[in-house]
Image (cartoon, rainbow, N blue to C red):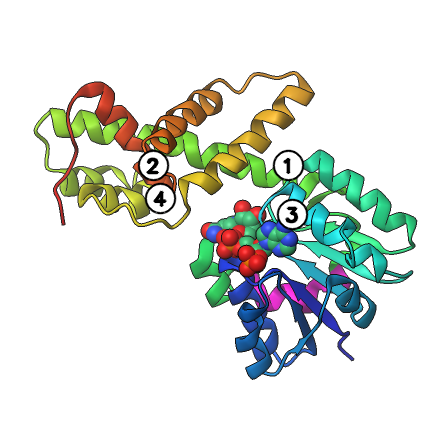
């Protein structure tokens, strides 16, 4: 028999994930800080809790997907937070991308109440959340992943146990380092191609299936070519994740040279008011330095 599940945070990601849980026929309770966002879920058959504490008291498994570390902390520790409704045997699954250190601290507090914690950040964007095809990287105990698996499978396809509590968040930061360093390579290569008078579409076509191919090149390269800066993932949120990666690197005492430089390049774009553009707009910072532009207006 399926357990009673709750979902906190019905934003771009949480919205699609929760709809998929409801569609799969599970008993779902939702809570969102801005209550109006819960209406469509009540209409789809979910219960709506008045507070995270009420949701935690009513549900066996509590899924969370909010913005940043202080936001998960607010949901857990705040007045009428999850901690006020938690009891032994419950399971908290955090899908937000937040600090690995903050995660381990919160997990310890939840564990002290006899409840379990999985950090389960996701990758795949709003499209993956809506389609139920997210990649989910999970830190915590294998038995708890098995307990959550039926629900995770309603939201994602690539569900990987990567280690102990906090490891899920660490792997998500690995993902973000790969994304931005890759986007810098795509940006520099496209600028070079444009300066050389190459046709950008055939250049991408020629290289994308070989050793230089990547998701960023194939998905974002064509968007750059037509100067379409609509976000799959916004610069402001990308910067939050780079901050988390740089903080973790600082704690470990290791250098992240390219990631650090790219975070400064993104900062120049935020300074110009471009924080809500997609992370592929990174190329604009190189264009500014080179005094030229790539591609054509749509
Ligand atoms: P979003 O659309 O901005 O939604 C954020 C959600 O968090 C909203 O429900 C918001 O409530 C809630 N929230 C924020 N601060 C809160 C607080 N202090 N207390 C209570 N609720 C709070 O963001 P999103 O794109 O869904 O991202 C959610 C998480 O998934 C982030 O950690 C993000 O990095 C990660 N992620 C995003 C993507 C993506 O492509 N968007 C991909 C992978 C991972 P309100 O409705 O009241 O504002």
State the image quarter where residue 35 is shown: bottom right
Q: Measuring from the top left, give residue 283's x and y in whole percent.
A: 28, 31
Q: Secondary structure at mark 3?
A: helix
Q: CA distance from mark 3 to mark 4?
A: 23 Å
Q: CA distance from mark 1 to mark 4?
A: 23 Å
Horizontally, residue 57 falls left or right of residue 50, namely: right
Callouts 2 and 4 close, C-beta under 8 Å: no
Which numbered disc, 2 or 4, marks the residue that appears first in the sequence? Answer: 2
Circle 2 residue: 273
Callouts 1 and 2 close, C-beta under 8 Å: no
Circle 1 residue: 170
Residue situated in front as seen by the camera: 22 or 138: 22
Furthest toward the front, the residue is 79
Q: CA distance from mark 2 to mark 4?
A: 12 Å
Q: Which residues are magenta?
A: 146-156
Assess disc 2: are there few (<14), some (14-19) or many (≥20) residues with their C-alpha within 10 Å of its C-alpha.
few
Circle 3 residue: 71
Residue situated in front as seen by the camera: 80 or 250: 80
């Amino acid at each position: 028999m399926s357990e009673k599940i709750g979902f906190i945070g019905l934003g771009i990601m949480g919205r699609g994930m929760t709809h998929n849980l409801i569609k799969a026929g599970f008993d779902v309770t939702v809570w969102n800080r801005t209550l109006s966002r819960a209406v469509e879920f009540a209409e789809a058959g979910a219960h709506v809790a008045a507070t995270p504490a009420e949701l935690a008291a009513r549900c066996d498994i509590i899924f969370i997907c909010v913005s940043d570390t202080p936001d998960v902390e607010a949901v857990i520790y705040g007045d009428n937070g999850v901690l006020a409704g938690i009891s032994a045997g419950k399971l908290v699954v955090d899908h937000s991308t937040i600090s690995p250190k903050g995660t381990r601290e919160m997990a310890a507090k939840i564990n002290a109440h006899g409840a379990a914690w999985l950090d389960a950040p996701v990758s795949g964007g709003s499209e993956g959340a809506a389609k139920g095809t997210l990649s989910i990287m999970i830190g915590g105990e294998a038995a708890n992943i098995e307990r959550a698996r039926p629900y995770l499978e309603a939201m994602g396809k690539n569900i990987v146990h990567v280690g102990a509590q906090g490891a899920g968040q660490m792997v998500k930061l690995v993902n973000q380092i790969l994304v931005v360093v890759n986007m810098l390579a795509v940006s520099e290569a496209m600028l070079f191609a444009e300066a050389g008078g190459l046709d950008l579409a055939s250049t991408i076509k020629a290289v994308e299936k070989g050793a230089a191919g990547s998701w960023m090149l194939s998905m974002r390269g064509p968007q750059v070519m037509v100067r379409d800066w609509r976000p799959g993932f916004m610069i402001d949120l990308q910067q939050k994740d780079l901050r988390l990666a740089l903080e973790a690197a600082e704690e470990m005492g290791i250098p992240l040279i390219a990631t650090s430089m790219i975070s400064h390049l993104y900062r120049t774009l935020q300074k110009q008011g471009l924080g809500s553009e997609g992370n592929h707009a990174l190329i604009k910072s190189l264009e500014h330095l080179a005094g030229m532009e790539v591609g054509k207006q749509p």
